[in-house]
Image: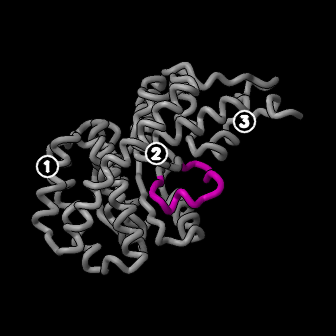
Amino acid sequence: MTKAEVKFDIAGVERETGIGKDALRVWEKRYGFPVPERDEREERLYPQEQVERLRLIKRLLDSGLRPVKVVGLEVPELNVLLEQLQDDTTQHGAELAGFVDLIKSHQGAALRVALSRTLLQQGMEEFLSKTIAPLNRLVGEAWMRGDIRVFEEHLYSEQVNHVLRNAIATLRHPGDTPRILMTTLPGEEHALGLLMAEATLSLCGADCIMLGVQTPIQEIVLAAKAHQVDIVVLSFSSAIPVVQVKSGIRLAREALPKKVALWAGGSGVAKLRSPIEGVQLMGPLSDLTEAVAAWRGAQIQKR
Protein backbone atom coordinates (compact mmCIF):
# COMPACT_ATOMS: atom_id res chain seq x y z
CA MET A 1 0.00 0.00 0.00
CA THR A 2 1.44 3.40 -0.99
CA LYS A 3 1.61 6.37 1.33
CA ALA A 4 -1.29 8.03 -0.55
CA GLU A 5 -3.49 5.01 0.11
CA VAL A 6 -2.90 4.87 3.87
CA LYS A 7 -6.02 5.73 5.84
CA PHE A 8 -6.58 6.02 9.59
CA ASP A 9 -9.70 5.47 11.65
CA ILE A 10 -10.60 8.18 14.16
CA ALA A 11 -8.79 6.41 17.02
CA GLY A 12 -5.68 6.19 14.86
CA VAL A 13 -5.83 9.90 14.08
CA GLU A 14 -6.10 10.64 17.80
CA ARG A 15 -2.98 8.56 18.45
CA GLU A 16 -1.06 10.04 15.52
CA THR A 17 -1.88 13.71 16.18
CA GLY A 18 -2.90 14.02 19.83
CA ILE A 19 -6.20 15.64 18.74
CA GLY A 20 -9.20 14.19 20.56
CA LYS A 21 -12.02 12.40 18.75
CA ASP A 22 -14.62 14.91 19.93
CA ALA A 23 -12.55 17.80 18.58
CA LEU A 24 -12.21 16.07 15.20
CA ARG A 25 -15.98 15.62 14.95
CA VAL A 26 -16.66 19.22 16.01
CA TRP A 27 -14.13 20.59 13.48
CA GLU A 28 -15.69 18.53 10.71
CA LYS A 29 -19.08 20.17 11.30
CA ARG A 30 -17.91 23.65 12.26
CA TYR A 31 -14.93 24.27 9.97
CA GLY A 32 -15.37 21.74 7.17
CA PHE A 33 -12.10 19.99 7.98
CA PRO A 34 -11.05 17.24 8.28
CA VAL A 35 -13.10 15.61 5.52
CA PRO A 36 -13.08 11.88 6.31
CA GLU A 37 -14.14 9.17 3.95
CA ARG A 38 -16.49 6.40 5.12
CA ASP A 39 -15.98 2.64 5.14
CA GLU A 40 -18.68 0.02 4.56
CA ARG A 41 -19.84 0.46 8.18
CA GLU A 42 -19.99 4.27 7.80
CA GLU A 43 -16.99 4.67 10.10
CA ARG A 44 -14.70 7.63 9.44
CA LEU A 45 -11.44 7.06 7.56
CA TYR A 46 -8.84 9.82 7.26
CA PRO A 47 -6.29 9.94 4.39
CA GLN A 48 -2.60 10.35 5.22
CA GLU A 49 -2.42 13.90 3.82
CA GLN A 50 -5.21 15.03 6.15
CA VAL A 51 -3.42 13.50 9.13
CA GLU A 52 -0.23 15.38 8.22
CA ARG A 53 -2.22 18.61 7.96
CA LEU A 54 -3.75 17.89 11.36
CA ARG A 55 -0.24 17.54 12.82
CA LEU A 56 0.55 21.08 11.65
CA ILE A 57 -2.70 22.31 13.18
CA LYS A 58 -1.83 20.61 16.48
CA ARG A 59 1.55 22.38 16.58
CA LEU A 60 -0.19 25.72 16.16
CA LEU A 61 -2.77 24.90 18.84
CA ASP A 62 0.04 23.90 21.21
CA SER A 63 1.52 27.34 20.58
CA GLY A 64 -1.68 28.98 21.82
CA LEU A 65 -3.72 29.65 18.68
CA ARG A 66 -7.43 28.82 18.74
CA PRO A 67 -9.01 26.27 16.37
CA VAL A 68 -11.15 28.94 14.69
CA LYS A 69 -7.93 30.64 13.52
CA VAL A 70 -6.22 27.59 12.01
CA VAL A 71 -8.41 24.55 11.33
CA GLY A 72 -9.74 25.74 7.98
CA LEU A 73 -6.34 26.79 6.62
CA GLU A 74 -4.43 24.97 3.88
CA VAL A 75 -0.92 23.58 4.42
CA PRO A 76 0.97 26.59 2.95
CA GLU A 77 -0.99 28.96 5.21
CA LEU A 78 -0.31 26.77 8.24
CA ASN A 79 3.42 26.79 7.47
CA VAL A 80 3.41 30.60 7.24
CA LEU A 81 1.77 30.78 10.69
CA LEU A 82 4.36 28.41 12.11
CA GLU A 83 7.17 30.61 10.79
CA GLN A 84 5.51 33.69 12.30
CA LEU A 85 5.19 31.95 15.65
CA GLN A 86 8.89 31.09 15.64
CA ASP A 87 9.70 34.76 15.06
CA ASP A 88 7.25 35.75 17.80
CA THR A 89 8.89 33.34 20.24
CA THR A 90 12.28 34.90 19.60
CA GLN A 91 10.83 38.37 20.10
CA HIS A 92 9.28 37.50 23.47
CA GLY A 93 12.31 35.55 24.70
CA ALA A 94 13.83 38.62 26.37
CA GLU A 95 10.62 39.32 28.28
CA LEU A 96 10.44 35.74 29.56
CA ALA A 97 14.10 35.88 30.55
CA GLY A 98 13.29 39.04 32.50
CA PHE A 99 10.69 37.15 34.52
CA VAL A 100 13.27 34.46 35.29
CA ASP A 101 15.72 37.13 36.44
CA LEU A 102 13.10 38.47 38.87
CA ILE A 103 12.65 34.94 40.25
CA LYS A 104 16.37 34.44 40.72
CA SER A 105 16.77 37.82 42.42
CA HIS A 106 13.88 37.01 44.77
CA GLN A 107 11.79 39.99 43.73
CA GLY A 108 8.37 38.43 44.34
CA ALA A 109 6.40 41.69 44.44
CA ALA A 110 8.03 42.97 41.26
CA LEU A 111 7.34 39.63 39.54
CA ARG A 112 3.67 39.81 40.51
CA VAL A 113 3.37 43.36 39.15
CA ALA A 114 5.13 42.41 35.91
CA LEU A 115 2.90 39.37 35.40
CA SER A 116 -0.24 41.39 36.16
CA ARG A 117 0.80 44.04 33.64
CA THR A 118 1.43 41.41 30.98
CA LEU A 119 -1.99 39.84 31.66
CA LEU A 120 -3.68 43.20 31.13
CA GLN A 121 -1.79 43.71 27.88
CA GLN A 122 -2.36 40.24 26.44
CA GLY A 123 -5.69 39.13 27.85
CA MET A 124 -6.18 35.83 29.63
CA GLU A 125 -6.05 33.47 26.66
CA GLU A 126 -2.83 34.88 25.21
CA PHE A 127 -1.32 35.29 28.68
CA LEU A 128 -1.74 31.58 29.41
CA SER A 129 -0.43 30.36 26.06
CA LYS A 130 2.32 32.87 25.27
CA THR A 131 3.57 33.82 28.71
CA ILE A 132 2.71 31.31 31.45
CA ALA A 133 3.07 28.07 29.43
CA PRO A 134 6.57 28.89 28.05
CA LEU A 135 7.58 30.47 31.36
CA ASN A 136 6.62 27.28 33.17
CA ARG A 137 8.93 25.36 30.83
CA LEU A 138 11.78 27.82 31.36
CA VAL A 139 11.43 27.65 35.15
CA GLY A 140 11.23 23.85 35.07
CA GLU A 141 14.32 23.57 32.89
CA ALA A 142 16.22 26.01 35.13
CA TRP A 143 15.24 23.98 38.20
CA MET A 144 16.48 20.76 36.58
CA ARG A 145 19.82 22.41 35.78
CA GLY A 146 20.11 23.69 39.33
CA ASP A 147 19.88 27.34 38.25
CA ILE A 148 16.73 27.82 40.33
CA ARG A 149 16.27 26.49 43.86
CA VAL A 150 13.09 24.87 45.17
CA PHE A 151 12.15 27.93 47.22
CA GLU A 152 12.55 30.13 44.13
CA GLU A 153 10.28 27.86 42.11
CA HIS A 154 7.75 28.08 44.94
CA LEU A 155 8.06 31.87 44.88
CA TYR A 156 7.27 31.86 41.17
CA SER A 157 4.28 29.53 41.56
CA GLU A 158 2.84 31.64 44.37
CA GLN A 159 2.98 34.84 42.29
CA VAL A 160 1.37 33.17 39.28
CA ASN A 161 -1.31 31.67 41.52
CA HIS A 162 -2.06 35.10 42.98
CA VAL A 163 -2.34 36.76 39.55
CA LEU A 164 -4.51 34.00 38.07
CA ARG A 165 -6.83 33.71 41.05
CA ASN A 166 -7.52 37.44 41.02
CA ALA A 167 -8.27 37.27 37.31
CA ILE A 168 -10.46 34.17 37.59
CA ALA A 169 -12.57 35.88 40.26
CA THR A 170 -13.71 38.36 37.60
CA LEU A 171 -14.61 35.55 35.17
CA ARG A 172 -16.74 33.33 37.40
CA HIS A 173 -20.06 32.12 36.02
CA PRO A 174 -21.98 30.56 38.95
CA GLY A 175 -25.04 28.68 37.79
CA ASP A 176 -23.90 28.32 34.17
CA THR A 177 -23.14 25.04 32.45
CA PRO A 178 -21.27 22.86 32.33
CA ARG A 179 -20.63 22.61 36.06
CA ILE A 180 -17.08 21.35 36.42
CA LEU A 181 -15.36 19.95 39.51
CA MET A 182 -11.59 20.39 39.43
CA THR A 183 -8.88 18.71 41.52
CA THR A 184 -5.88 16.37 41.55
CA LEU A 185 -5.57 12.90 43.04
CA PRO A 186 -3.50 12.06 46.14
CA GLY A 187 0.20 12.32 45.37
CA GLU A 188 -0.23 15.19 42.88
CA GLU A 189 0.78 18.39 44.66
CA HIS A 190 1.13 20.66 41.62
CA ALA A 191 -1.78 23.09 41.32
CA LEU A 192 -0.60 25.49 38.63
CA GLY A 193 -1.76 23.39 35.68
CA LEU A 194 -5.15 22.98 37.33
CA LEU A 195 -5.39 26.72 37.85
CA MET A 196 -4.55 27.39 34.19
CA ALA A 197 -7.30 24.97 33.20
CA GLU A 198 -9.75 26.77 35.51
CA ALA A 199 -8.90 30.08 33.87
CA THR A 200 -9.48 28.60 30.40
CA LEU A 201 -12.79 27.00 31.38
CA SER A 202 -13.94 30.20 33.08
CA LEU A 203 -13.30 32.05 29.83
CA CYS A 204 -15.63 29.54 28.16
CA GLY A 205 -18.39 30.45 30.62
CA ALA A 206 -18.22 27.20 32.62
CA ASP A 207 -19.09 27.11 36.32
CA CYS A 208 -15.93 25.76 37.98
CA ILE A 209 -15.80 24.29 41.48
CA MET A 210 -12.18 24.07 42.61
CA LEU A 211 -11.25 21.54 45.31
CA GLY A 212 -7.51 22.15 45.18
CA VAL A 213 -5.02 19.30 45.17
CA GLN A 214 -4.80 15.73 46.48
CA THR A 215 -8.47 14.85 46.88
CA PRO A 216 -9.21 11.15 47.51
CA ILE A 217 -11.35 9.54 44.84
CA GLN A 218 -14.25 8.79 47.18
CA GLU A 219 -14.33 12.43 48.24
CA ILE A 220 -14.37 13.46 44.58
CA VAL A 221 -17.41 11.22 44.07
CA LEU A 222 -19.18 12.77 47.07
CA ALA A 223 -18.31 16.30 45.92
CA ALA A 224 -19.53 15.56 42.39
CA LYS A 225 -22.87 14.44 43.80
CA ALA A 226 -23.15 17.32 46.27
CA HIS A 227 -22.46 19.93 43.59
CA GLN A 228 -24.40 18.07 40.87
CA VAL A 229 -21.56 18.49 38.42
CA ASP A 230 -21.53 17.55 34.76
CA ILE A 231 -17.79 17.02 34.48
CA VAL A 232 -14.81 16.20 36.69
CA VAL A 233 -11.41 17.52 35.59
CA LEU A 234 -8.21 15.92 36.91
CA SER A 235 -4.73 17.36 36.38
CA PHE A 236 -1.48 15.37 36.30
CA SER A 237 2.01 16.87 36.16
CA SER A 238 5.05 15.17 34.62
CA ALA A 239 6.23 14.35 38.16
CA ILE A 240 3.63 11.56 38.40
CA PRO A 241 4.72 8.18 36.92
CA VAL A 242 2.72 7.19 33.86
CA VAL A 243 1.54 3.96 35.55
CA GLN A 244 0.13 6.00 38.42
CA VAL A 245 -1.53 8.42 36.02
CA LYS A 246 -3.24 5.61 34.14
CA SER A 247 -4.38 3.72 37.25
CA GLY A 248 -5.64 6.91 38.92
CA ILE A 249 -7.71 7.90 35.90
CA ARG A 250 -9.20 4.41 35.59
CA LEU A 251 -10.10 4.22 39.28
CA ALA A 252 -11.74 7.63 39.12
CA ARG A 253 -13.74 6.62 36.05
CA GLU A 254 -14.97 3.45 37.73
CA ALA A 255 -15.99 5.33 40.88
CA LEU A 256 -17.82 8.22 39.23
CA PRO A 257 -21.37 7.87 37.88
CA LYS A 258 -21.48 7.26 34.13
CA LYS A 259 -23.45 10.46 33.57
CA VAL A 260 -20.53 12.49 34.93
CA ALA A 261 -17.90 13.06 32.24
CA LEU A 262 -14.24 12.70 33.20
CA TRP A 263 -11.57 14.87 31.59
CA ALA A 264 -7.86 14.50 32.37
CA GLY A 265 -5.04 16.79 31.31
CA GLY A 266 -1.57 18.06 32.08
CA SER A 267 1.94 17.05 31.07
CA GLY A 268 1.52 13.73 32.90
CA VAL A 269 -1.39 12.79 30.63
CA ALA A 270 0.70 13.59 27.55
CA LYS A 271 2.86 10.55 28.41
CA LEU A 272 -0.05 8.13 27.92
CA ARG A 273 0.27 6.18 24.69
CA SER A 274 -3.32 5.08 24.30
CA PRO A 275 -6.82 6.40 25.08
CA ILE A 276 -8.71 5.35 28.21
CA GLU A 277 -12.30 4.26 27.69
CA GLY A 278 -14.85 6.73 29.01
CA VAL A 279 -12.26 9.46 29.59
CA GLN A 280 -11.44 12.50 27.49
CA LEU A 281 -7.70 13.16 27.51
CA MET A 282 -6.68 16.78 27.00
CA GLY A 283 -3.57 18.16 25.33
CA PRO A 284 -3.15 21.93 25.11
CA LEU A 285 -5.52 24.30 26.89
CA SER A 286 -7.35 24.88 23.60
CA ASP A 287 -8.61 21.28 23.87
CA LEU A 288 -10.71 22.42 26.84
CA THR A 289 -12.36 25.12 24.76
CA GLU A 290 -13.27 22.60 22.07
CA ALA A 291 -14.44 20.06 24.65
CA VAL A 292 -16.82 22.56 26.25
CA ALA A 293 -18.24 23.44 22.83
CA ALA A 294 -18.70 19.74 22.03
CA TRP A 295 -20.36 19.10 25.41
CA ARG A 296 -22.82 21.95 24.85
CA GLY A 297 -23.56 20.72 21.35
CA ALA A 298 -24.32 17.25 22.69
CA GLN A 299 -26.71 18.69 25.26
CA ILE A 300 -28.63 20.54 22.56
CA GLN A 301 -28.99 17.33 20.56
CA LYS A 302 -30.41 15.54 23.61
CA ARG A 303 -33.26 18.05 23.94
**What secondary structure characterizes most of the magenta part?**
loop
Image position of 126 (left or right of 231)? left
Query: Going 79% across and 25% down the picture, which residue do you hit?
Result: 39
> Colour mode?
one colour
SS for dot 1: helix
> In this rendering, is residue 143 above or below 91?
below
Q: Looking at the image, tell me whether mark 2 or mark 3 is earlier in sequence order.
A: 3
Q: Amino acid at mark 2?
A: Asp
Q: Which residue is identified by label 1? A: 117
Q: Which residue is identified by label 3? A: 9
Q: Is residue 42 magenta?
A: no
Most extreme residue toward the right, as rendered? 1
Q: Which residue is identified by label 2? A: 62
Tell me the distance, in whole angstroms, between the alpha carbons under discs 1 and 2. Answer: 24 Å
> In this rendering, is residue 172 above or below 157?
above
Residue 173: x percent and y percent?
A: 21, 39
Q: Quadrant of the C terminus?
A: top left
Which residue is nearer to you in this view: 137 or 101? 101
- Chain part drawn in magenta: 264-279
Residue 165: x percent and y percent?
A: 19, 55
Residues packed near mark 3 inside 10 Å, few (<14), some (14 to 19) or many (20 plus): some
